[in-house]
Amino acid sequence: MERIEILNLLPTVLSGMAKDDPVYRELERIIRSPEGRKAMIAATTAGLPALAGVEPMIVASLGPLYGPHDQGTVSAGGIIGEVMRPMGYRKDRDSAPMPIGSVAQSAATWIANSI
């Protein structure tokens, strides 16, 4: 029985927060919002990681609840991928530096599929 419980936890540990976590739900709300999408596209257009555009909104809402300590930054990146691909973007680089002062140190960059 212990082995089953441990195996059931692996996807959460390796890929970010549990989807029913209130912080995760707030990340989703912000990132999937029209404002979040606009901010991610603006950051991408400027050559920055999409997370650079939306992270200030996340920090404003979640404050110290958002960070790498609980896979929050990893979860944000995963949600961003779920949003950017259907909007016509593909991952350009897996890891690029975030702007100084960001919570996340690095994040993926995206490029429009038409380029």
Image (cartoon, grey):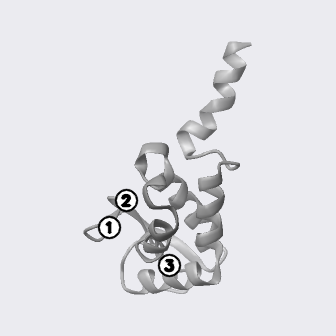
Q: Which mark is residue 40?
A: 3
Q: Residue at x 64, y 77 (%)?
A: 33
Instruction: Give the SS element for disc 2.
Output: loop
Q: Nearer the viewer, residue 98 or 115?
A: 98
The residue that label 1 is drawn on is 98
Locate residue 27 relative to residue 111 in the image: left or right. right
Helix, strand or loop at mark 1: loop
Q: Nearer the viewer, residue 31 or 85?
A: 31
Asked whether, in this view, residue 97 is left or right of residue 82, the answer is left
User: How far from the left and from the top, in percent, is residue 99?
Assistant: 29, 71
Q: Residue at x 64, y 64 (%)?
A: 28
* Mark 1 burial class by Cα count in 10 Å: few <14, some 14-19, many 20+: many
Q: How many marks?
A: 3
Q: CA distance from mark 1 to mark 3?
A: 13 Å
* Residue 20 seen in render: yes
Residue count near mark 3 (Cα–Cα under 10 Å), binned few <14, some 14–19, many ≥20: many
State the image coordinates of residue 86 (x, y, percent, origin top left): 67, 74
The answer to whether marks 1 and 2 mark residues whose Cβ atoms lie closer than 8 Å is: yes
Q: Residue at x 45, y 66 (%)?
A: 59
Label ID, residue 50? none
What residue does disc 2 label?
104
Dot 1 amino acid type: Met
Identify the residue shown where x is 59% and y is 71%.
30
Question: From the viewer's perspective, is residue 58 above or below residue 114?
Answer: above
Label 1, label 2: how many angstroms apart (C-alpha)? 7 Å
As shown in the figure, which amino acid type bears the numbered disc 3? Met
Spatial CA span between label 2 and label 3? 15 Å
